[in-house]
């Protein structure tokens, strides 16, 4: 983006603050409160995290919320997660889509973090509903192993397109079949969110965990699922804010390798 005066960056930060909170607060007042509470850190939250990064046009705010919810769950930053689940709903995510982030993360960040994330999100849903009782979510479809294997093959066929020889496959002994049936036949074959969104979730957690080998595979899979290179660059920029510059830079390195291979 071109250089902008501070007043413009600050105004952009005010706007993001307002939309994260559903338009229920004045962005300038919220920014002043952040600076009063956090000092210089609050200034950079408004001017850089929100004014420079969240205001970029390369991702919708709905998609950036999806990415941030994933990163915060992976980091187990539950206080910040609570705020961003609420902000994600204000940016257009549905309860089902938010819950599906945690379902997917069970396989890619571990069940404990997924359960903690789901627990926090459920509290936000109840608060917004104004009730101690939350309508139950649907359980998973019960599938026999033949069906799970067939679904896994269908998912993998698409994800494997344009991948370099060898891939990231590794033998897990007699657990390999169970692992593939769960990851690809159960999780990836669910239709509660698109495979494009599922790719954004998986790339976000892998860059957060600093898993470059798996990340490169899933960056190409994301392209296969319709995510654009610009959107993947924005994902890495978002990682700089929520995980730090070293992690974002490593993510850019992995993306550059995938981009160079696709151009070749």
Image: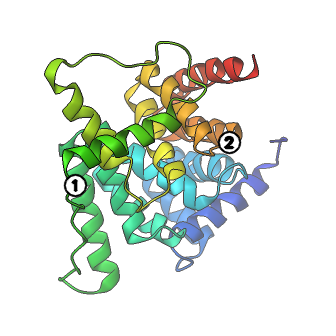
Find the residue positioned furthest to the bottom: 130
Viewer-nearest residue: 26 or 125? 125
In this rendering, does residue 74 appear at all? no
Q: Nearer the viewer, mark 1 or mark 2?
A: 1
Dot 1 falls on a residue whose secondary structure is loop
Please tell me which residue is depicted at 26% across the width and 16% down the height of the picture.
171
| Depth check, front residue: 89 or 186 | 186
Find disc 2 in the rendering and name its residue: 228
Residue 154 position in % (x across, y down): 43, 42
Q: Which residue is mark 1?
A: 143
Q: Is residue 26 above or below residue 104?
A: below
Expressed as whole percent of the image width and height from the top left, the position of residue 260 reads: 70, 18
Q: In 3D space, how far apart are the residues under numbered discs 1 and 2 (Cα atoms)?
A: 33 Å
Mark 2: which secondary structure?
Answer: loop
Question: Around disc 1, counting alpha carbons within 10 Å, would you say few (fewer than 14), some (14 to 19), or many (20 or more)?
Answer: few
Quadrant of the drawing holding the N terminus:
top right
């Amino acid at each position: 983006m071109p250089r902008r005066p501070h007043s413009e960056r600050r105004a952009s930060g005010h706007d993001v603050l307002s939309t994260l909170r559903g338009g229920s607060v004045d962005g300038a007042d919220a920014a002043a409160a952040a600076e009063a509470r956090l000092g210089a850190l609050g200034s950079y939250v408004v001017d850089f995290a929100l004014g420079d990064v969240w205001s970029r046009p390369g991702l919708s705010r709905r998609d950036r919320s999806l990415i941030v919810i994933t990163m915060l769950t992976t980091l187990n930053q539950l206080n910040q997660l609570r705020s961003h689940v609420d902000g994600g709903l204000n940016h257009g995510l549905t309860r089902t889509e938010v819950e599906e982030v945690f379902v997917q993360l069970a396989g890619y960040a571990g069940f404990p973090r997924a359960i903690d994330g789901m627990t926090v999100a459920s509290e936000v849903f109840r608060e917004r509903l104004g009730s101690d009782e939350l309508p139950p979510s649907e359980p998973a479809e019960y599938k026999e192993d033949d069906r799970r294997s067939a679904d896994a093959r269908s998912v993998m066929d698409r994800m494997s397109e344009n991948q370099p020889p060898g891939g990231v496959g590794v033998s897990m002994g007699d657990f390999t079949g169970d692992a593939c049936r769960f990851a690809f036949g159960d999780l990836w074959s669910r239709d509660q969110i698109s495979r494009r969104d599922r790719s954004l979730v998986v790339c976000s957690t892998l860059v957060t965990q600093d898993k470059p080998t798996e990340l490169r595979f899933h960056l190409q899979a994301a392209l296969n699922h319709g995510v654009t290179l610009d959107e993947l660059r924005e994902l890495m920029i978002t990682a700089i804010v929520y995980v730090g510059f070293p992690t974002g830079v490593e993510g850019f390195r992995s993306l550059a390798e995938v981009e160079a291979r696709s151009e070749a």
